[in-house]
Each structure stands twice: as structure tokens, then as C-alpha cells.
Amino acid sequence: MKRIAIIGAGPSGLSQLRSFRSAEEEGADIPEIVCFEKQSTWGGLWNYSWRTGTDNNGEPVHNSMYRYLWSNGPKECLEFGDYSFDEHFKKSIPSFPPREVLKSYILGRADNSDLSHMVKFNHVVRNISISKDTGKFNLRVTDIENNTDLVDIFDIVIIATGHFSVPNVPYFEGIENFMGRVMHSHDFRDAAEFNGKRLLIIGSSYSAEDIALQSMKYGAKEVICSYRSAPMGFRWPSGIEEFPIVERFDSTKSFFCNGSNREIDAVIMCTGYLHHFPFLQKNLRLNTNNLLYPGQLYKGIFWLDNPNLIYLGMQDQYYTLNMFDAQSWYARDVLLDRIQLPSRESMEKDIKNWMQREIHLKNPTQEIEYQTNYCKDLVELTDYKIDYDLISKQFIKWEKDKDEDIVAYRDRSFISPVTGTQAPAHHTSWWDEMDDSYGSFIGKI
Ligand code: FAD
Ligand code: NA7
């Protein structure tokens, strides 16, 4: 029987565990699986931590989420095919829940699936290498609680360590002389810190958009978003503006490439994250930017040079939870010999084809359709069921809602692809709702 190691018990790792559990429930013999998780509990990024830098064990803090984080897409677009929001909450809830509510849902399926015995918490994977003699993977893992290192051998390794945790921090001329606060979005925790402040945000993607809005909502004086490639172009509330890329700083000002400059109090770099796998033997490390189809991975999952190495959730993400499920169900079926991988040549051709198609995508609608097709392609041969076409339509509608009104898009309601339920409206508009607690959101429906 194969031995499988999963690294990480965030949503991707949990999807993989759930996929095997579901096969087992239907009578299949499943391999021995050990999931190593460096945190004391599961949930990955959804475990909010006030800490930044290193944690109480001296390990890098994994968390990049912050207070007042609400879902940035409709919950109906991330719903699990085999576990609906209605089932978890015993009633239907609005489409854009705050972090704690989504975390409850993600953990709910794991709790109900009896997965915890497969996870070793407080275990940091330090090193993975391949034995030249056997072709098996040697793992070195630190058991943090007992302060011991263990070594173990596995046939299959599944990397589910996420890719939104290690910040990409570019250098800008003179920033070392700037006297205000400088941070990366990975360390952003509480928008109220910037109450009354003039804030410069660098970047023009999801983090920039959400942190700019949050900061205004919680009292920032003004927010400038500085873009490298293109402005986000939303109809921003008063106080938020977009400038082309910042070129340099002095002690109090930022200078932009269009010749203008502004006095600012703080800088938040929303400049994305690195795919970072220091624990892997060098020639096994996925090396990519944040793409919908990272290279080197067949079906976006299997390491081309050695398909016994599997990566989950390494894509840029419109889809999240049910894409991780699609990947996990497919990987499971390969590992259970229900699906055969084609020749290396065919896999390489397939990867090139998908990557080529990504280059030609022109707008978010095409990107959403592309990732929809990716998910559909994966589940075609498995028993995972969800209506990706409905999800796709709703993602496209969500993009339009954002263009119409970036402040109000979270007040809209969507249809569950699992139960068909239309979500109720939240009792307060997102812009006016300062309380993101579970009790306020779930209690007052
Ligand atoms: P992660 O959640 O990052 O989990 C990886 C796990 O691996 C962690 O538990 C970590 O501790 C563990 N790990 C890492 N290294 C090791 C090691 N060496 N040894 C052992 N364990 C290790 N998605 C949405 O659907 N909706 C949202 O609203 C949303 N908002 C987001 C907001 C922010 C600020 C960010 C950064 C992401 C957001 N996401 C959102 C996307 C998010 O990436 C996914 O929802 C999801 O958390 C990805 O799951 P994952 O398991 O792939 O990775
Ligand atoms: P993303 O989506 O990877 O975006 C990174 C942004 O940072 C993007 O706008 C980049 O600009 C910008 N960037 C990267 N490097 C630079 C430099 N050197 N100078 C200026 N701008 C730069 O990361 P996010 O944090 O926004 O989102 C990650 C996840 O968190 C996402 O899935 C959400 O769910 C929450 P570019 O457009 O490439 O020119």
C-alpha cells in the first residue's frame, strides 16, 4: 500500500483528506495518509493571528488575513459540492460572509468528516528529498511540541502549503529614508491603525483593492493606490485615488512616474506573494508567478518530472474551495489507479496548450471562463459534482457588480450551486457594517 504525505492542513490539504474519506465511505481501501501541519490547528490562512513576523515557536507566521476581512467573492462561488452552506448553518445566510463565518464553514466539513486522526499538528516539514536508490521521498519534520526531529519515508508527497504567505517585497529608491510606517499586506492586521492617515498602497490587485476600501471605511484620511501595469479603474469612494507607479521616496513624500508627488504617512505594499518551498529539494520546487496555469504541473497538479509529487492550490484564484476539491478528487483517483496518467510527452503538450491559452486571455470574464473550464476538465472523470457553469455565470456577474459599485458589491445576493437557494440580503450594507463578528452576522438574519 502506498504511503502518502500531505504538507499543510489548510483548505487544499483538507480537500485532499476529504476526497480520500469520501472514497473510503463508499467502500474503497485507501492508502496510509499522514498530513503534517505546522500550526496547532487546521484552516490555513483562515486562522487569523494577531501576530506578525514569527510565532511563539519562532516559525514564520503563516497568516496573511486581517481583521474585518469579508469574503471577496460570493460564497456561492466557493461552496463545496458535497457540503452546502445551508447544511452547515441550518439556514441560508447572505452571500458575502466575514472571515470567521467562512472559517466555520470550511472547518465544518472537516469536523464532520472525521479527518483529524490523519493530521499531525505542530509538525513543520523541514526537508523533502528523493532517495536515488528507491525513488521514495525522505522527509525531515520537526515536532514543535516535543522539540524533536523525525524522519520518515513516503511514496507520494502532496504539497498544500499555499502561496499567499511569503511576501514579495520590491525595493523603491529612497524608501529607507521614508519616516512613516512601511509594511507588506502580509503584516496588515487592523485598518483602524490608519485612521486619520494618508496612505500609499502599492499594487493593483485584490489586496490593494480591499485594503484601500477597508482603510477608508475605518477612517483613513486619504488613500493613493499606485499601479505598475494598469489601474483597477473602479468608481472609488471619495478619498481613494489611483496614481501610476511610485518611483522614489524621500522622508515624507512619494514621487510618481508621471512627475507628481504626495505627502504620505504610511506605505502598504500590496505587491503579492512568492511561491516559496524552501523545504523541497531544489529540483522539485515549483517556480512560478501567480498564474492561472503554472508551468511544470500536469492538470495544474502533477509535477511533470515526477508525478509522485503533487501540488494543490498553486494557481491564481478566482475559484478556491471547490477548485481545490476538483484537484484533490482528480489526484485521489490517480492515486487509487482509477485514472491513468498519459505519457510524459502528452502531459507536456497538454501543459503547453493550457499555458498558451492563458497568454491570450484579455479580461476577467475570459479568465473566469478559463478557470471554469479547468475545473470542469478535472471533475469530468471523477464523482465530484457541482454546477461550475452556474458558478461561472455568478463570478461574471460579481465582476460586473464590482465595476458598477465597488462599495456595494458585497450587498448583492447569489444562488447556491448546491441547493439552489437564493441568499438573503444582509441586514446592513457592507460599507456601514463595522461589526464583522460571527454573532452579528449569523445572529441577526
Ligand atoms: P493556505 O490556506 O495558505 O494553507 C496552507 C497550510 O500549510 C497552512 O495551514 C500552513 O500552516 C501549512 N504549512 C505551510 N508550510 C508548512 C510546512 N513547511 N510544514 C507544515 N505545514 C506547513 N479565498 C476565498 O475563497 N475567499 C476569500 O475571501 C479569500 N480572501 C483571501 C484574503 C487574503 C488576504 C488572502 C491572502 C487569501 C484569500 N483567499 C480567499 C485565498 C486563499 O488562498 C484560500 O482561501 C485558501 O486559504 C488557500 O488554501 P491552501 O490550503 O491552498 O493554503
Ligand atoms: P496578486 O493578485 O498576486 O497581485 C500582486 C499585485 O502586486 C499586482 O497588482 C502586481 O502588479 C503588483 N506588483 C508586484 N510586484 C510589483 C512591483 N515590483 N511594483 C509594483 N507593483 C507590483 O496579490 P494580492 O495580494 O493582491 O492577492 C493575493 C490573494 O490575496 C488573492 O487571491 C486574494 O484572494 C487575496 P502587476 O499587475 O503584476 O503589474
Image: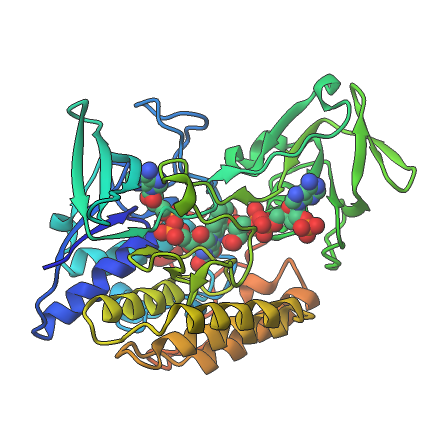
Give residue 307's position: percent from left, percent from top: 33, 60
Left or right: 75, with 340 as reference point:
right
> Would you identify the image quadrant in which residue 81 lies?
bottom left
Q: Which quadrant would the C terminus be assigned to in this image?
A: bottom left
Q: Nearer the viewer, residue 273 or 48?
A: 273
Does the rendering let one see residue 215? yes
- Residue positioned most to the front: 133
Task: Write the residue at 90% across / 37% down.
Answer: 260
Q: Which quadrant would the N terminus be assigned to in this image?
A: bottom left
Give residue 282's position: percent from left, percent from top: 42, 40
Q: Nearer the viewer, residue 342 or 158?
A: 342
Task: Write the residue at 16% across / 61% down.
Answer: 113
Give residue 266's position: percent from left, percent from top: 68, 28
Q: According to the image, what is the colour scheme of the structure? A: rainbow
Task: Write the residue at 76% across / 29% down.
Answer: 264
Does the rendering let one see residue 213? no
Q: Nearer the viewer, residue 134 or 118?
A: 134
Task: Write the residue at 15% across / 71% down.
Answer: 23
> Would you identify the image quadrant in which residue 196 lies?
top right
